[in-house]
Amino acid sequence: MKKKFITRGKYGTFLSLLVSSTLILGCTKSEKTSFDIKKVCVGHTCSLGVTPLDKTYLQGLVKDQLVSTVPYIKNDIKNSNLTWVGLRKYAGKYITDNKVLEAMHIPQCGDKDCNINSDPTAYIFPENIKTANVEVKGTIDIKNKTFDVDSFVDITFKNDLSAPTITDTCTGLTCDFKVSNIAAYKSTPVDLYWMSDNKTLGKSKSTSGNGSFSYTFTSDKTPVSITAYAETSDNNRSVDSNKLSVFAPEVTVTATASQSTVEEGKTITLTANATLPDGVTVKSYSWALQVVGKYLQVV
């Protein structure tokens, strides 16, 4: 930037130019460790975990500029001694069964025990509250150095996040999945996570292609269960969608009797015959009889 200063005196008018520029202090970098709380909620059930972050700053004249944020790898974190002090003010309860968290696709608790000191922990907040503010305090050892932790997270509960309703169309090994109630996410865009046996196949966005998702399987010999759930940008999740069974074998079962009529007190033999695809076997049959007029019918 150039500024002009005009000076008048007995010797006439002189024009002086003053050129100013930004002073660059080399490329001096500094690192700082901070701690964020990662929360994932399904309704009022939340998983809460501490994420140590390695932040790199570039020194500037007025303020340092953040140039990168990288989570520490698990092997760098040697020990933690944390207390979720912010949960003491809520009349909720810790989850005692990690299978509940697995069904919700949210992280399981540290040492598989959800309590005030576990990282992560999991907590069911009271249904009558709309927001919560949670603080965690303690220390974490990273690369043989101990850091103090005092972090907060604000939570806004969303119990009205609809579960997806999904359909499928398969051609060969490739299946196209769609969300039939995509309009439910018009005001609140979501990511849609597509799951099979608690494993993530991939994700799609409600704002792109109506949330549709395509996946190519490696085999059609084994039935595959597919579900999906929705997640907002602030980590609120829906419950699971309806369940689809992809590549479910088509089984035809017929039953025959050793004779069409039988006297009361006598015995007949019933035989079941199943038409099965390759690789499928029958473990057992279930029989039921119902009265139709004067006759017994096998169902």
Image (cartoon, rainbow, N blue to C red):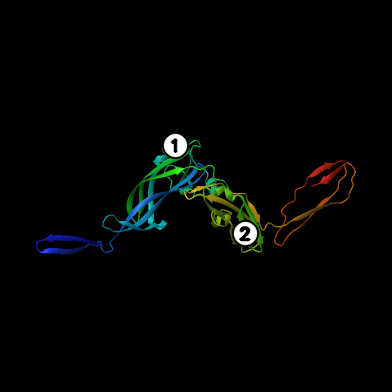
Give percent across and percent down for residue 215: 59, 61
Quadrant (top left, top right, bottom left, bottom right) of the N terminus: bottom left
Q: Is residue 136 visible to the viewer in this orientation of the structure? A: yes
Q: Write down the residue under mark 2.
A: 176
Q: Write down the residue under mark 1.
A: 90
Nearer to us: label 1 or label 2? 2
Give percent across and percent down for residue 221: 67, 61
| Element type at mark 1 | loop
- The kind of residue on which mark 1 rests is Tyr
Q: As rendered, which of 145 and 101 lies closer to the eye?
A: 101
Q: Is residue 109 left or right of residue 239?
A: left
Q: As rendered, which of 41 and 222 lies closer to the eye?
A: 41
Q: Residue at x 30, y 56 (%)?
A: 64
- Determine the CA span between mark 1 and mark 2: 44 Å
Give percent across and percent down for residue 44: 50, 41
- The kind of residue on which mark 2 rests is Asp
Q: Residues within 10 Å of mark 1 (few under 14, many from 20)?
A: some
